[in-house]
């Protein structure tokens, strides 16, 4: 349940306010030079408190690697790593012990398990995505040595109702986030990801399609509500004669004239850029009073305090890239050996 | 690669024009009375040629059960079934042997495997979804005996640019499909699914979230381009104070005032209706001339003939329901035993 | 539960007296020329009624391939096949409907599922090993094209208390089996298997060791009671200085002076022949009267009739080879790509 | 590759001389009171240096739990734990950097991965079994709360050629081990395990038989060479009329008169004690000079120093119990819900 992948598996563990979070990444090919600077860079991008737009919790997020790396290279053994939880002020959450926060996982977790670690969201906290960043950076490092031309880049394409497209929209986003912070409210957004340089022939038909792997991975991110690739939901309104990507020859290679398909046909990459988008709901933690119920079935009003981001997409960009790298490497490893 | 599920697994097999297609469904609890009329009903809904809106191929689609059922009840052993391909006119496809049809799986399959069964789309044909219907009907039968109040109902909510909402839109859809048929073109659409009566507490946190299972399953359907649940992509534009679902007590039960979440919070059902939408691209098979390339790298123009539907969503409704049933039953089986 | 393997998966289905038994083999590399004569040969070796030593049931065992093969070659799609049950005289078993046969699966199956197909042993019949032979022959065909020097050969090394080692023992075995047939009794035996020509470096450390894969597969065969590789249980009595296999250089290659290890060290092949042995208990079906109980809890005496073999190992030889081929190919496919 | 189990999964990681070893145990039911004293007890039994019979390395083996436990109870989230490697004198092993130790995993690991952590055996060290003990103790704790009458007890039944059966054999074993220590040699042994109080109906038919799960788990232990259950290899020599376990009624319950089956029939427990035996080869590390080769293909003589046990079975007893507990709990969890 806490593992993703088939030949490349990532198992994560840890709660927001437990001793540590971490992961075990099994299946990274042996002999890869491990680039810890990429790990640090991705962790830094995910880190809260890095600027005034995101929540103030200051996590040093020191990643300690415990296994699977020898003299700077992967050995083929599982790579385990932990990140200590050093800034876990559980008392901030004491008030939430017996209250189900609206649109959080408190109530459903309680129904599923009959017990929950209520401190800081426990296992359902967005903090549990940090190990994904570490693993994703390792997967990207391995991919770079296998397909040097590959790039996986995600970016925010929408914050609340604002389409992000340059300097002008940046100012609007700043203004929106300032307002949300003042009003103790939050908003959602959309992240777009492009995988460039992926060779044709990666993926699988039927149930393990490349888009199925990507969709499942992205739907595992906290607050994700939608996934589409290529023209996505827009494709529903199109005609086949508009949507179909004509094949052409270019420099002796099969290419497509357009890329409505988003680089995937029949579950397998076609050599064009793989493009997909992930929609996120507003951060459910808001400061405004909210109607809710207690764990013993009494209605109440919740006025939450504590740290939170007004928009979850700001920190989710490296998570999207990381999961994409994990899925791509796994699907490549599962491909038929020739 | 052709298997979905963890404790309830469906493995499908077969090509459009091979001897038979079929599946093996393993994990249906023992002792369930098997309702073959539901199997037939779902197969009938998926069947092409059933009305003038869909392609003319007349498949009797006789399902033969081979195992796992004894004296009308499931035994806990795998339930295998086959459907013979009786109407496979491969010669219709002879012309496609050496041509990559745009936005089909021909080219990517060739790159992935170096060989492909080009007859009628082979393994990539929409025909391979028929076994999903059979298995889905069995899963639904099992679910009904476990949760009698459960219903899983999908419906077409959009055909091309037309929102489907009643008598008026039906006429528009008819007109659009008539025009597409005349123009040898196609269009896409959206299917909405509602799972009602699902108890709270079903699903899993982190990578095996209920929405991740649903998204992966739906993204495995031919031509699917997007998945969203609850408010989906619309949630990106909302404020947290709008989106959050307040908890209330009603008849001694925890309910939510709204259902922006789509019945899932933190990957686990919350007792409200689970709602999701799946976007489909236009059927890639169209009659209009299309620019493409041959398998030996020459540019050419394809003028396809043969049977096809102007809109894939017309037949995909029972597929969506079937996959939803398989995912729900599997997640329920994987839930912690108490 | 009815699937073996990770990248190469075999899912079997079917009961002894249902419409058909069969399997789905997924993961055979694309482009392999399929040698159906090997399938037939292995099926023939497994077939009962082939000589006077084994039971008289005459199964034609016609294998029908349904998918995954195109113009004589594998396509990478799942290869499904069925074998019709044509000689299923269920009435022979009517008397067993309410009686638990000693050391059969009747009682445990009933406890596990609350229902059982009692006709001919149902899903627990040795007949369900036939699909393993089909799949094993396909796996062997694929292996031959990948490692032409590979051979997997099993042989009976013990029948009852008789060590099989040539002409003299053959006469003793004949005499034993004649006696058993007359006395309506049965006995066990041991099968030895040698995998020759396997390159070093195949297998995995820790839980997916090559010997773990082999042991699990062999313990899945009906009546198997023990597995050992290399010196096996004898190794327990040895000294390290006796057991260790010294490394030598031979023709520029690393070889071992002895092969106590049985070709596997640390879970991975070392280039020497992989050797293992599988012990089988006596066929539990015997004609002698046996004390047992009925399904409604009454003690009774069972005097079984019907067809059975006096020694199960006579037919298990190709099963052992087939499972070995499936395990080897799967472990090779799972090996790190370079 | 480093994960065992289906619904209850244990993923282990770590090398003998890396920063830490550990594991992630996912699937322990929620709400179980965690008995850390049992963890400590099992770790203590496995610990080297505990008496003069085993190697002198003094590992404190402090287990640190990182997740999945809240207020003394399991939460249903993965339980991660680490054990720091505090006594890792890698320089002891420097001489082994370029030499393949006979019957160790050095050569095969190098062939498989092209790189190996040679310090103390790296990932192939027996030290990696420590996390299995931790996980096994947790699994046993969970099992005890589900089946209070269950006991899983392993014991040494053979050391070298000596059958262990009481006071007399103990003296012989002492003498043997003293001699081996003096002669810098080693020997093997056999461990017998009995699972008492397991209800009938646990396990699965065909490929996931209870004995298949046990065999695979045991064959994953370092130095294990053979597995048998019930009468095992002895059953090969028996007659069916001797081997079959007659059913009787006792106190209204179905029992068997004998237990040649070892508590398992058709892959499923029958309510009698489950008995199995595991054979171990001699510890491959010996002090005597051995013929071997270097990593650059030169023949050489190895005279190993460093810490080692003269007999591996002394420490393997809790490992066998632990893996048995993990397999039993997993199979129980996978059983059909009623």
Image (tube, coloured by chain):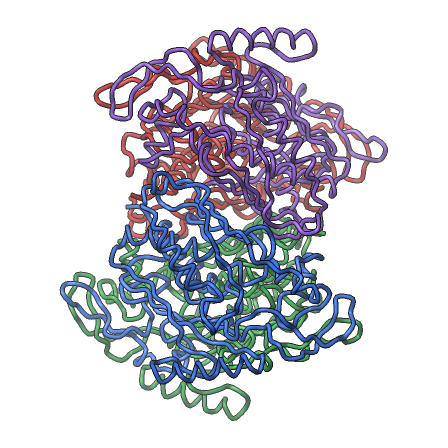
Chain colours: A green, B blue, C purple, D red
Determine whether, in the image, residue B112 is placed left or right of residue C190: right
Residue D48 location, x and y as percent? 50, 31
Residue D42 seen in the figure: yes
Tell me if residue A48 comes above or below residue C286 in the rendering. Answer: below
Residue D49 seen in the figure: no
Please tell me in which quadrant of the rendered image residue A94 appears.
bottom left
Residue D11 location, x and y as percent? 49, 46
Residue D325 location, x and y as percent? 40, 35
Tell me if residue D262 comes above or below residue D109 in the rendering. Answer: above
Closer to us: D133 or D88: D133
Closer to us: D74 or C260: C260
Closer to us: B327 or D140: B327
Residue B231 location, x and y as percent? 37, 76
Closer to us: A80 or A271: A271
Q: Residue at x 52, y 55 (%)?
A: A10
Determine whether, in the image, residue A211 is placed left or right of residue D241: right
Determine whether, in the image, residue B197 is placed left or right of residue D302: left
């Amino acid at each position: 349940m806490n593992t993703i992948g088939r030949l490349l598996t990532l198992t994560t563990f840890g709660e927001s306010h437990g001793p540590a979070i971490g992961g075990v990444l099994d299946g990274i090919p042996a002999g890869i030079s491990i680039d810890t600077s990429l790990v640090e860079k991705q962790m830094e991008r995910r880190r809260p408190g890095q600027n005034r737009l995101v929540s103030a919790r200051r996590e040093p997020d020191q990643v300690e690697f415990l296994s699977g790396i020898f003299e700077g290279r992967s050995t083929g053994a599982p790579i385990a790593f932990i990140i200590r939880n050093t800034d876990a002020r559980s008392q901030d959450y004491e008030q939430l012990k017996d209250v189900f926060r609206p649109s959080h996982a408190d109530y459903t977790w309680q129904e599923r398990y009959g017990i929950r670690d209520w401190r800081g969201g426990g296992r359902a906290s967005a903090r549990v995505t940090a190990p994904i960043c570490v693993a994703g950076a390792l997967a990207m490092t391995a991919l770079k040595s296998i397909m040097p031309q590959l790039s996986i880049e995600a970016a925010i394409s929408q914050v609340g109702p604002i389409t992000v497209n340059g300097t002008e929209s940046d100012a609007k986003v700043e203004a929106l986030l300032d307002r949300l912070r003042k009003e103790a409210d939050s908003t959602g957004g959309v992240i777009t990801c492009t995988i460039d340089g992926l060779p044709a022939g990666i993926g699988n038909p039927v149930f393990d399609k490349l888009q199925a792997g990507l969709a499942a991975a992205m739907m595992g991110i906290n607050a994700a509500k939608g996934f589409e690739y290529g023209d996505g939901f827009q494709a529903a309104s199109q005609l086949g004669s508009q949507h179909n990507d004509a094949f052409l020859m270019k420099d002796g290679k099969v290419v497509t004239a357009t890329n409505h398909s988003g680089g995937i046909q029949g579950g397998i990459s076609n050599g064009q850029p793989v493009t997909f988008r992930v929609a996120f709901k507003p951060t459910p933690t808001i400061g405004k009073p909210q109607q809710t119920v207690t764990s013993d079935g009494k209605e109440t009003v919740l006025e939450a305090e504590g740290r939170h981001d007004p928009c979850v997409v700001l920190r989710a960009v490296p998570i999207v890239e990381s999961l994409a790298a994990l899925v791509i490497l796994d699907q490549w490893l599962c491909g038929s050996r020739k």
